[in-house]
Image (cartoon, rainbow, N blue to C red):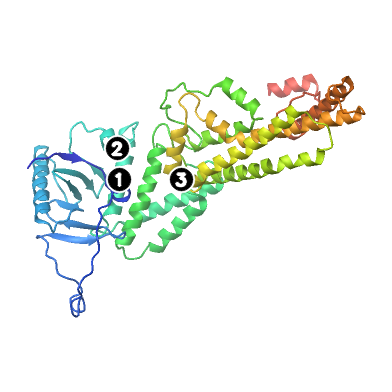
Amino acid sequence: MAGDLKPTTAKAITMGRYYGQATLVEPFNMVIEPALFSVTGDIPQYLPPKWTVHVQPEGQRYFFKDTDIRIVSMNDVYDPKVLEKIDYWTEKLMDILDKQAFSLSDDIELFLQIEGVDCHYYFVNHRTHVEFWLDDNLSTDELGIDPVVSASHLKLAQHELYWVHVELFPVHLRSFAPHILEELIGYFSQGWADQLTSSNSTNPYSAQQCAEFVKLLRSVQGQPQNSNTRWIVGRLWALAFQQRFRTHYGEQVVQLCRNQSILVDRYGSNVRESRVVDILMSLLTFKASDGYVSRLNALHVDWISYEYDWILFMKKCLNDWKYMSCLAFLSPLSYYAINTMPTLLFLSMFSGFCFSASFISSILLIHRHESLENGTAGEAANYLGAVRSKNFKFQWVAFVYALPKTFLLWGIIGSICNCLFGVAALCDGGTSLTSPTCIYYFCGTTSFCLLAIIAFQDVTSDQKILQFPSFHWRRSSKQESVSLAV
């Protein structure tokens, strides 16, 4: 029989189930037999010896064979041709096991998936809770596993894949030992406490979500285990080991807070944001882009994103852009209050352009990002990875995000300058905006406003523009030298 034996993973099978192209079926009208299902309950379908059919909690049907080597498959074993292929590839794998002198036990289970003439496979060990393969020189890249830093780090990925297998095929499994559930409750309890006492926890779930998980797990603790219980444990342990793998749990270098980078940048270890671009953007946007750069960098550390952080960020961005669009729409109405003043046409056109640009950029940003408001962690990571620049990281994205506020502020500055010219012209007793007296009045009022802004900055911010002398009671130099010596 032609074809290849290919290693796969439980996660790859999951991706195919949830995100792959589903097989289409066409319902039809069926004749109902008299007293159908009233006696036997089911229409009998006969399986080959030692095969049983099961339906996991999500509704997916699968088959299990309890022999010397335990086999699970989602292929239709009722079909003799499919069964023939499964038997053929099982024999091939048994030959490989014999050559490698690998002894089977009741804890070993084989997954087979027939696709055309090829067969995808993996093994799981229910005692050590890992997924494994038999191929020589098999790399993590071939299996879709992210790069690792050690064998113990790879083991975390194998633990995750094992629990994904449990989630996929929970019905035929034996009951777990009680400590499996207790450790899982402990994991989410620790995450709950970490989220309540820290703003940078690496746990991917909020305190409220962790509390809900703990409540859910305690509700099934001590109850007789069934497929639903095993499905819950499998799903949550897989998520727990996914987080541990990403943060390098138990390794020499481990990520202890989410804004701490521990990986060499994919674009090179020397990638830094351009200082010149940073200064220019900061000046042009009145530092509005600085906050976006800082937040975007914090949202995408080591190419990992957290769902609830992303949702909060997107909600704030959308609210800010909506607010800016309203201000940009209403600001030109202020000209009606000063229509009796003489104004400069250039400044009027400049302000109008800025207000229009602020309104349009707000609408475009809202339209582009409203679908991302409730994005998952994966969607957030994919989006941020796509817009991240190789040389400038998130500087250009932050600049675009700051455009509505930037244009609004420039429009307001243009309007204020126009008003100051008008006030200066009225104080001069005429309407000429180019007379020396008008220019003097304008310079004076502008200087006063500038000093007022500087004073406001010094009073309300820790970043001082003017350094005024301060006087404090100080100890004598002798006392200071004594305290330093101590």
Relative image position of residue 156 (x, y in whole percent)? 33, 41
**Contact? badges 1 and 2 (CB < 8 Å):** yes
Give the residue number, with chain letter if any, for mark 2. Answer: 144
Q: Residues within 10 Å of mark 2 (few under 14, many from 20)?
A: few
Q: Which mark is residue 254?
A: none
Quick check: can you spot residue 149? yes
* First in residue order: circle 3 vs circle 1: 1
Instruction: Tell me the residue at 70%/28% (across/down).
Output: 463
Give the residue number, with chain letter if any, for mark 1. Answer: 11
Q: Which mark is residue 204?
A: 3
Relative image position of residue 60 (x, y in whole percent)? 27, 58
Quick check: can you spot residue 249? no
Which amino acid is tagged 2?
Gly
149 with respect to 120 (left or right): right
Q: Name the quadrant containing residue 409.
A: top right
Using the image as rendered, state which of residue 159 and residue 414 is in the foreground: 414
Relative image position of residue 193 (x, y in whole percent)? 51, 49
* First in residue order: circle 2 vs circle 3: 2
161 with respect to 377 (left or right): left
Which amino acid is tagged 1?
Lys
Using the image as rendered, state which of residue 210 and residue 414 is in the foreground: 414
* First in residue order: circle 1 vs circle 2: 1
Vertical placement of residue 418 versus 103, above or below: above
C-alpha span from label 1 to label 2: 9 Å
Image quadrant for the C terminus? top right
Instruction: Tell me the residue at 75%/35% (across/down).
Output: 460
